[in-house]
């Protein structure tokens, strides 16, 4: 168990998952990134600059909020919300983009590209690029540009170019393909800022490290508040960055159970879900070996769930590994359950969550009665609901 804390290994593997499956042309750029990151990690000035940005600009540390009325409604448990929704740009994504853009500056790259689904990572990347005066281009599935029009406007106002992707299902996985394609031709001047703990080595590790600030803070905060560690940590999983960020600093605390919650869409019996860890099989997607939703012939399945941030047929290799070694448990809840949980949190606490973390709240609501009395639970509240208001109100208030 101790050794696993230091994963991935030198070749970027988490057990059988991870690694590097990319065109030859980007190998050099990945090696450059790995070396730059290794040097940055050891550089006190880099760490200080990132910490200062996270505090002064992004709004860290975020509160670990004891949700009294939610706890009481769910039963005899104590629920704490890690409030990443209060960060600048409204979600945890900024933890990662500030780190990566700082690295890009260090590597002398003048241009940054990114893929985006809901638009949250695109906005967070455009924000960090504006802050450092870097050129920014964001690839976004054309279907998503329509679903998340406001985020397109935000990115453009921030000075980024938004390029709609018209291939495939015109969503996140197609935007990833297009970003990789663009990177192949521009690697010398361009940093590819990946939005989750996915992609080839060193991205899953790098993004995990930048997001681990969530769990490090939460660990200290829960010890201060309760004098002990939580029994359970729950977070939603799209690519898996907010969940790994919360879980990883508790990895060695074996009594802290981890539950990752995926979007079950309209149900696992339908083709409308994104439950990769629950239903996926090993395969290669976007540069890494991981669990993937695929048909018998290995064709990647299209996902279709209400939360755009969870609408992805792959998942970070570290989660695939946690599942394999049974360090974490992964479940799926439906869109309908998530919508109900949105209303529940809004009504009991005056906090309107993004749709994505509402899946985590929904799962907690479903299992709360089975938890031991007095259980302490930390829930990753990855983002706020503003971006989803049209969908939430249409479906809930009709
Ligand atoms: C992007 C996003 C997610 C999903 O991404 P992960 O990498 O799985 O964290 C979850 N919640 C919010 C609010 C998001 O914007």
Image (cartoon, rainbow, N blue to C red):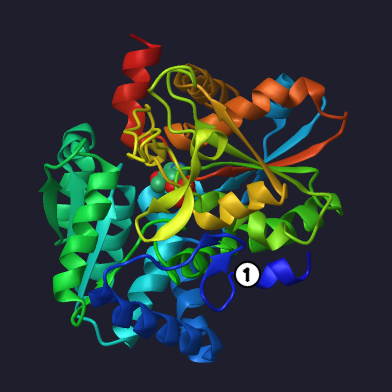
Foreground pick, 170 / 219 = 170
In the image, 286: left or right of 338?
left
* Residue at the far top in the pictured view: 398
Q: Tag 1: Cα neighbours inside 10 Å, few (<14), some, or many (≥20)?
A: some
Q: Which residue is mark 1?
A: 7
Compared across the picture, whether 269 is left or right of 217 comes to left
Q: Position of residue 128 (x, y in %)?
A: 30, 67
Residue drawn 22% across and 38% down?
A: 144
Q: Is residue 106 above or below residue 182?
A: below
Q: Quadrant of the C terminus?
A: top left
Side of 145 relative to 132 (left or right): left
Quadrant in which the N terminus is drawn: bottom right
Regarding residue 349, the answer to whether it shows in the image is no
Q: List x then y, in percent, for residue 8.
A: 58, 70
**Residue 177 quadrant:** bottom left
Q: Give the percent coordinates (x, y) of residue 211.
A: 52, 61
Q: Quadrant of residue 161?
A: bottom left
**Residue 170 coordinates in the image, percent (x, y):** 19, 38
Foreground of the two, 59 or 318: 318
Q: Secondary structure at mark 1?
A: loop
* Residue at the image point whose x is 27% and y is 53% from the top: 176
Residue at image position (23%, 37%) is 148
Q: Residue at x 79, y 51 (%)?
A: 225
- Against 98, residue 398 (above or below) is above
Foreground pick, 279 / 344: 279
Specify whether tag 1 is near ligand 1 (CB below 8 Å): no
Can residue 224 be seen at all in this image of the molecule? yes
């Amino acid at each position: 168990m101790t050794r696993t804390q230091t994963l991935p290994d030198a070749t970027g593997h988490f057990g059988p998952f991870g690694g590097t499956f990319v065109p030859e042309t980007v190998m050099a750029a990945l090696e450059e990134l790995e070396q730059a990151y290794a040097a940055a990690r050891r550089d006190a000035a880099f760490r200080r600059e990132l910490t200062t940005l996270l505090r002064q600009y992004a709004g860290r540390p975020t509160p670990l909020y004891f949700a009294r009325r939610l706890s009481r409604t769910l039963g005899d448990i104590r629920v704490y919300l890690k409030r990443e929704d209060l960060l600048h740009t409204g979600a945890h994504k900024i933890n990662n983009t500030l780190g990566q853009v700082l690295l890009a500056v260090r590597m002398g790259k003048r241009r940054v590209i990114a893929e985006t689904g809901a638009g949250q990572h695109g906005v967070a990347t455009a924000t960090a690029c504006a802050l450092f005066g870097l050129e920014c281009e964001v690839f976004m599935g054309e279907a998503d540009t329509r679903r998340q029009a406001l985020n397109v406007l935000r990115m453009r106002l921030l000075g980024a170019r938004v390029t709609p992707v018209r291939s495939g299902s015109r969503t996140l996985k197609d935007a990833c393909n297009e970003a990789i394609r663009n990177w192949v031709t521009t690697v010398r001047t361009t940093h590819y800022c990946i939005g989750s703990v996915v992609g080839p080595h060193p991205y899953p590790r790098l993004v995990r490290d930048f997001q681990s600030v969530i769990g490090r803070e939460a660990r200290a905060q829960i010890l201060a508040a309760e004098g002990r560690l939580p029994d359970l940590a729950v977070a939603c999983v799209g690519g898996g960055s907010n969940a790994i960020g919360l879980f990883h600093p508790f990895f060695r605390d074996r009594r802290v159970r981890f539950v990752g919650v995926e979007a079950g869409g309209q149900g696992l019996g339908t083709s409308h879900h994104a439950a990769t860890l629950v239903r996926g099989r090993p395969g290669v997607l976007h540069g890494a070996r991981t669990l993937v939703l695929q048909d018998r012939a290995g064709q990647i399945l299209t996902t279709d769930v209400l939360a755009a941030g969870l609408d992805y047929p792959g998942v970070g290799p570290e989660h695939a590994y946690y599942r394999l070694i049974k360090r974490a448990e992964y479940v799926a809840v439906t869109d309908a359950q998530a919508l109900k949980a949105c209303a529940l949190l809004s009504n009991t606490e005056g906090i309107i969550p993004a749709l994505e973390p509402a899946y985590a709240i929904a799962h907690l609501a479903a299992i709360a009665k089975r938890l031991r009395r007095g259980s302490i639970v930390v829930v990753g509240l990855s983002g706020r609901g503003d971006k989803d208001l049209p969908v939430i109100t249409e479906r809930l208030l009709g």
